[in-house]
Image: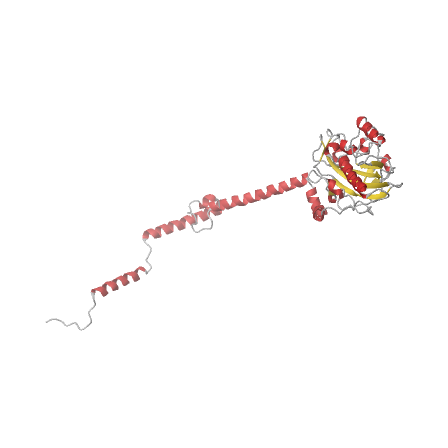
Amino acid sequence: MAQQDDGPRISDEEWQRFGEQAGQRSSDVPKEPSARARMVTERLRREDEERRKAAGRFGRGRNATATEPPGWRTGPTWQERERLGRGKRRLKGAAAILFVAGLALIALRPELLIDRVTGKADARQEAERVGPLAAESGRPTGAPEVEHPDRPTVKDPFRGSPALQWADGAAAIEVPPARALNGVDQDRIADGLAKAKQFLVAANLDPAVLRGERPAAALALLDPKDGDTHRRMRTAYERPTEETDPLELFTRYDPAELRPVGDVVKVRGRMWLEAGPEPGQAEIKVDYSFVHPFVKVRGNPEDVARTIVRREMTFQVVDPKAWESTPGTLWIRTNLRDVANTACDRYDGYLHPSFFSDGEASGPEPSGAAVDPYDRSGGIDTGRQEECGTLSRS
């Protein structure tokens, strides 16, 4: 007789799902390590212990960790530590090279450090920011201040000089407005003013005249009826002497000895009008200083010297109805010059400045008090031209 089954029957699909779930739970249960795994772990433990003992006896070296795989229970591998060490050493080496190079640069040019300490660098930047001074409207009341004396360089030939803020070349020679004066009409005065500027530029700024060529353009501006001036200059160029010196009217250097630094000459001064001593005569007064930087052709190419040429001149313009003259020309009524930083015992018609690298100067001993060639507060002292004076700066 068949046995009756009162419980619910389980389908084959449910039995299969039950078996799969049971297999998954059994895989989560920790398994006991195999005998081989236990042997490997024990061997590694003994090797670690032996290495620690060896390190204690002989000190730890690279070979102490040579058998460890990279990153095995450690920090960075020895290869990584060596790479980091090399990087640090390179940085230290580069820093040392920069430090030594900086010391060498300061040894060669100590002014780089001194300028920062003394404030010269700031003073230069301030001068560059301020720009050129306005033109002189009258005679200055004193000499320019001396704040930070500084030697010139080829790059900055006017460094340490008041001329750093002076205008450049012909642009610094400003012509005043023309007006009729003392019986001379305005047009003739205007022409005279223009001719006076042309003469100053030709005599002190023309590169050809500066290097010693004959000043034909400048002499053409002077009245040929002023025979004395023309004769003196012709003799001066042919046979210069103390009495007949081309420097009397013209600025010149010997190109075999000197070379100008750059093409800029700094200029400061003024031009103005006055009535002449007689009716029908008008006078154009000029007072200008020209600063010329030079280096020697055969010498230290970095040693720059400046020569300052100051000229006070009076040009005369006349009424041709009252005075004999050649239209469109000038007469030179008075002429004074003062040349600072040139040999005072050489009369060959050229400038001969002293340089820092010359050492102790030869020739006549300087006499009189020190003179500031940038002091334009007084006129040119005629007596001082006879002396071999001392300069307070150049």
Number of marks present in the image shown: 0
Q: Position of residue 39 (x, y in %)?
A: 35, 51
Using the image as rendered, state which of residue 9 and residue 288 is in the foreground: 288
Q: Position of residue 71 (x, y in %)?
A: 43, 49
Left or right: where does residue 191 sit relative to residue 12? right
Q: Quadrant of residue 253?
A: top right
Q: Residue furthest right?
A: 278
Q: Residue furthest bottom?
A: 6
Residue 268 visible (yes or no): yes
Q: Position of residue 218 (x, y in %)?
A: 77, 34
Left or right: where does residue 89 sit relative to residue 182? left
Q: Residue furthest left?
A: 1
Q: Quadrant of residue 251?
A: top right
Residue at (54, 45) in percent of width and height? 88
Q: Position of residue 289 (x, y in %)?
A: 79, 40
With respect to residue 195, does 257 lie above or below? Answer: above
Q: Quadrant of residue 393?
A: top right
Residue at (80, 31) in percent of width and height? 246
